[in-house]
Amino acid sequence: MKRIFTAFMLLLAGFAASAQNSLLSPDGTYVYEKRDTCDLFMDVYDPADGSEETFMGHRKPTIIFMFGGGFVGGQRDNQSYNPWFRQLTENGYRVISIDYRLGLKGASKMGIAQVNLLDKAIHMAVEDLFSATNFILENADQFEVSPDNIVISGSSAGAISVMQAEYEIANGTSWASVLPEGFNYAGVMSFSGAILSREGKVDYKKVPCATLMLHGTSDELVPYNQIKVFNLGFFGGGKLVERFKKFGLNYNMYHFTGYGHEIAGSMGTTFDLQDKFLKTNVMQKKMRIVEAWIDDPNVYKGSGPQSRKELYGN
């Protein structure tokens, strides 16, 4: 009998482990926009049952996520993001992972000389993000989303898109005119992102929302500092933080010393940094400035492309 009981307990443990390691399924999938070439979908992951959905009287924000892939590939439901989605939902956050059009798909090479192609690809992605945002706002009651409590996040190309989106809002450009008047996100989380500017520098006419940036100092795919030709500039986290300091903005910046583009995939191993940012800078709206240089062997080391040559073949 003792052996049978032991076997039964081991079987239960196996089932529990299997459930823990199983993929998190979305609670709903919706078409948020119909383009000429495709339908764009979003997956909604609700906070896990029993999770703490508030912190110190503040409701935890909804996190919109844009995947990476150099504007040539990637999927909203890539399994590599699933453990991070589980972390977020088990900690009371709602996650909405969205499709967007891949404006560089089929590109044979990529560099500053192809800035017009890059500009178009970023514009398409930001346009889709704003469409997804409007869909969420129009269905806020159904999704249990507070319009003033939405954070945008992205990896690599997705990080470029969310950083650019907030830049367009803060500067009142025509790109942002499709959003409701006065709307802004509650925060931005960028994993190896950048901003494209045609003015030769990054300026803000209005104060942008609280921003979390993580970037590898040796990133050769999305530049850590900048690539600049005349008035065209592509500014990464290492350069953007200088502008944030100058303007006295609300930011957290983590420089990952010696790391390359693998920081674009570090969401799961940097969750504590995100959670602190969300609870303090976003939910409590505190001006908590953090700048740190990190060399942590436990941070995710990815196997994806680490340079433009690897991704685009040039």
Image: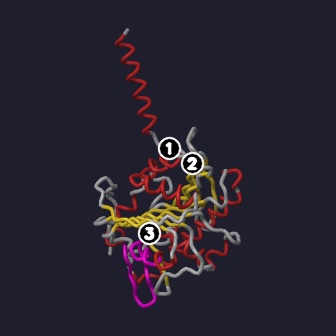
Q: Is residue 228 magenta?
A: yes
Residue 64 position by quadrant:
bottom right
User: Which element is circle 2 on?
Assistant: strand
Question: For the residues marked 1 and 2, what is the alpha-carbon distance in whole angstroms?
Answer: 8 Å
Q: Quadrant of the N terminus?
A: top left
Residue drawn at x 34%, y 65% is 293
Residue 290 position by quadrant:
bottom left
Residue drawn at x 49%, y 59% is 277
Q: Is residue 92 above or below residue 12?
A: below
Write the start and end of the magenta stretch as one range.
224-243
The residue labelled by disc 1 is 24
- Residue type for callout 2: Tyr
Kindly report which numbered mark, 3 or 1, lies closer to the viewer in this rendering.
3
- Which circle's residue, 1 or 2, is located before the other in the chain? 1
The residue labelled by disc 3 is 193
- Residue type for callout 1: Leu
Residue 188 locus on image (x, y percent): 52, 65
Q: Is residue 230 above or below residue 191?
A: below
- Mark 1 vs 2: CB contact within 8 A: yes
- Which circle's residue, 3 or 1, is located before the other in the chain? 1
Q: Is residue 180 above or below residue 44?
A: below
Q: Is residue 281 magenta?
A: no
Mark drawn on residue 45: 2
